[in-house]
Amino acid sequence: MSLQPRGTLHSRGTVAAELPGAGSPQGFRRFDELFPRAALVGLMLLSAALRVHQLGRESFWLDEAFSVLLARADGRWFFHALADREANMALYYGLLRLWTVAGEGEAWVRGLSVLASVLTVPAVYALGTRLFGRRAGLLAALLLTLNAFHVRYAQEARGYAALVLFATLASLLFARGLVPREGSRRVAIWMGWALVCALAAYSHFFGALVPAAHLASLAFHRGGRRSIPWRPLAAATVAVVLLVLPLGLFIVHRDVGQVSWIEPPSPVLLRTFFRRLAGGGGDSLLAAYVGLGLLALWPWGQPAAGAGAVLRDPQPNSAGSGWAGAFLLLWLLLPVTLVYLVSRVKPLFVDRYLSFCLPPFVLLAAAGLQRVAPRAIRAAMLLALVALAGRGLVWYYDGDDKEDWRGATAHILAEARRGDAVVFHAAYVARAYEYYRDRFEAGRKPPALVSPSLGYVHFVRTADPRELTPSLLRSLPKRYGRVWIVLSHEGFHDVQRAMTEAEIHGELVPAYPSVSEHAFKDIRVRLYSRAAEPRT
């Protein structure tokens, strides 16, 4: 295997890929211009198909049901909840509030994330084209399209797909902003960068790390300090700080244990994270990504034997700069490193929170792959990558990752009788039950919700959460003939679980000696009754 340069630097600051039409008659040149566009449209269609496939198969898990309940909460309490406790993903909740006007089924609600995920494909293509040429842009778009990690969070009613989209758009604007230009267009690009960086932060708090990685990459800029547009950059940076300042104040003053369930990270967790980020196709796929990324980065801006410049800076007069590689490497590793180190003190490391590190991973792999020669070897490597990515997709589609609140709620409603009560071991999981109860009850009499309170479930700020206590359990036999206990998230440490499972059982079994249990994905539903229930 040898290395070869791919393309030449255009005056607009992009590297043009070597395509068959170069120097050919006009018809071939037109084909060369149309092919990338047609290929990109095809990738977007494939991306949509992969993300829509089995979109509504699995139940909402807790966080997804939480998203829907918050989005449809009464307007007054919706904004109270955002200001008081749920500012993270505030932008997503606002968009979902509009989106759910048309429906609240699993497939439709997740469709908002699908839309953001599909739009990320052309954004990655545009960024890859600007940094390394059209071939690398198409390769990166292909790798992103087939990435199971990206598909997974496209099929989740949370803000992670939007976070990845805004992080990619912000990075594209940052790269464009470094290209010398005059007048209002430069100002518009930098103000756009500031706005999109803020949108990333309001999609998830960790999105604020994106502009930090961008600014850190300037240390590797080969164009020199004079070539950096310091004034508009400084103004845009100040704008970013001002826009995200409310989030910073929220983090300082409203930290009330929202992430207390996260465990401290370990080196094994880091390896698992990068395996998932590569697409979940096993160690072989991760090794391929790492190897191709190193190939893209080595040697930065220096000619390898017979290879010419490895990476080119998106500046029209700086041949052979390693800025693009440093830019992507910092975007990939700086957030991961910072969050990992902070998590040694306050655990924050969760793979989906760092999903915005995926675009630089696929871009580096694509840049490395396009440097491989001859073409037969490059094609074979691409086929291997596609096969490994396909394996990751098959494993994802065949798995059952989400809690089955749909099945658990349907079971309770089907078996419930008048005079039953339902109690949740962990108060916050009642929101997933409440979402499906609203959908399924259709004239049935659901069990009375004893703990937590209905006001707590629906984000009414003044509502008493009605904590589960021994005295509350002892009062149930006087009011209810049977009691349903819902057990979930039992491996999580949290302050909202005032009693252990054994303590609950000890309080109830004297009055309700007959106990039966049904298990669902990550949920157990236990029925306490006074007499033995007939088997169903």
Image (cartoon, rainbow, N blue to C red):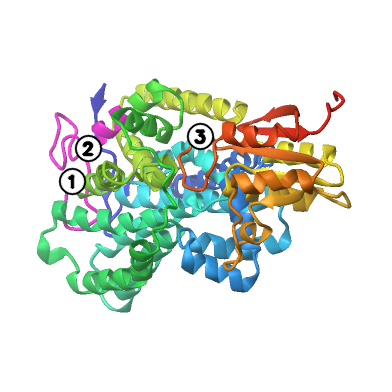
- Which quadrant of the view contains residue 79? bottom right
Distance from Cα at disc 2 to Cα at disc 1: 8 Å
Nearer the observer, 526 or 121: 526
Between 166 and 103, the one nearer to me in the picture: 103
Q: Amino acid at mark 2?
A: Leu
Query: Which tag, 2 or 3, sits closer to the chain's start?
Result: 3
Q: Bounds of the magenta span?
A: 290-319
Q: Answer with left or right where residue 484 lies relative to residue 171.
A: right
Q: Is residue 325 magenta?
A: no
- Give the left or right position of residue 24, taking residue 405 as reference: left
> Where does label 3 land, which residue?
148
Which amino acid lies under the numbered mark 1 shown in the image of this protein? Gly
Nearest to the observer: residue 292 or residue 96: 96
Q: Position of residue 338 (x, y in %)?
A: 26, 47
Vertical arrangement, residue 501 with respect to residue 117, above or below: above
Q: Residues within 10 Å of mark 1 (few under 14, many from 20)?
A: many
Mark 2 = which residue?
A: 297
Q: Residue 11: image x %, image y %?
A: 26, 59
Give the Cα distance between marks 3 and 1.
Answer: 30 Å
The quarter of the displayed image where residue 100 is located:
bottom right
Please give the name of the residue rendered at 55% of the width and 40% of the height, measured from the top-left corner.
499
Q: Are marks 2 and 1 in contact (CB under 8 Å)?
A: yes
- The spot of residue 222 in percent (x, y) is 13, 53
Question: Dot 3: within a 10 Å radius of its alpha carbon, few (fewer than 14), some, or many (20 or more) residues?
Answer: many
Instruction: Give the labeled residue for mark 1.
Output: 322
Is residue 22 visible in this depiction of the protein?
A: no
Q: Earlier in the sequence, mark 3 or mark 1?
A: 3
What amino acid is at disc 3? Ala
Taking the image as shown, residue 266 lies to the left or right of residue 93, namely left
